[in-house]
Image (spheres, rainbow, N blue to C red):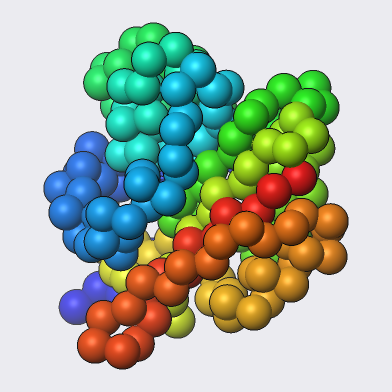
Amino acid sequence: MKKPKFMTSIGGYNLAANRYDEKEGYLNSFEQKKLLPLLGNVRGLKVLDVGAGTGRLAVELAKFPGTEVTALDVSDKMLERLKKKNPAITCIVGDAEALPFVSGSFDMVIATFLIVHLKNPARFFDEAYRVLKDGGRLVVTNINQKDPPTVKTSEGDIIIESYYHRPEEARESLESLAFSIEQEVMIKEKDVWVNQILIARK
Ligand SMILES: C[S@@+](CC[C@H](N)C(=O)[O-])C[C@H]1O[C@@H](n2cnc3c(N)ncnc32)[C@H](O)[C@@H]1O
């Protein structure tokens, strides 16, 4: 059997985009329907979804009246699929570590299943802090994934560059950047944490 090919996020997600939505139920299971209620009232807010992918979350957020959603991702193929689901969402190809927005642009920045692909999430947290308005919130999830999964694509099996981050590490990194942690929810399966949800305020 051929060994899976190791790929960066851009190359990997561009290849994986056309089958990504098949995993929606599996991805949702790491949130156990707890994420959206935790966000509270997002009506009328300016929200940036970083690493938005095919819009699993962005599309839901855009359903709230008056909510203006911007989706950013390194993979143009993932965003192409998002755009088809809701053309009103502004899609921008870009890097979480160098956000192409002026400071103080958003009420909320959200990033689900993103930091698992970042070697140093603090670079993204720093950027998120910058683009948030004073009092704005960063919502981030941190999946407990020590071994990255093999992903099937039309060009064979691949493994996408991934990094494991301990929950304390993620929390401390946010605090050291002057965020205050408002909520931390550990999603568990059979007493083992599978996903950490952090809500931090600027
Ligand atoms: C596991 S998917 C999550 C997609 C979506 N947030 C969700 O919850 O379904 C990770 C996404 O992060 C994107 N990504 C990885 N590294 C990135 C970076 N440095 N900047 C922006 N997006 C990135 C990938 O292209 C991919 O679409």
For the point 45% across and 81% down, which residue is it? 146
Image quarter hosting the C terminus: top right
Count how many numbered circles sit on residues in the image. 0
Q: Does residue 48 sit above or below 89 in this rendering?
A: below
Q: What residue is rendered at 32% in x and 78% in y?
A: 188
Q: Nearer the viewer, residue 180 or 13?
A: 180
Residue 186 seen by the camera: yes
Height in image: 143 above or below 80?
below
Q: Is residue 70 left or right of residue 170?
A: left
From the image, which quarter does the N terminus lie in? bottom left
Q: Is residue 15 above or below residue 91?
A: below
Compare residues 49 and 66 and report the one nearer the observer.
66
Give me the residue at 15% from left, 48% from top: 22
Q: Nearer the viewer, residue 83 or 66?
A: 66
Residue 154 visible in the displayed image: no
Front-most of 9 and 180?
Answer: 180
User: Picture coordinates of residue 112 (x, y %)?
Assistant: 45, 51
Where is residue 54? Give x, y as percent.
Answer: 33, 35
Residue 42 in the figure: left or right of residue 34: right
Q: Position of residue 23 (x, y in %)?
A: 20, 53
Could you say where residue 99 lies in the image, as x and y percent from the top left? 71, 33
Which residue is the extreme one toward the bottom?
191
- Residue sitting at x 58%, y 54%: 199
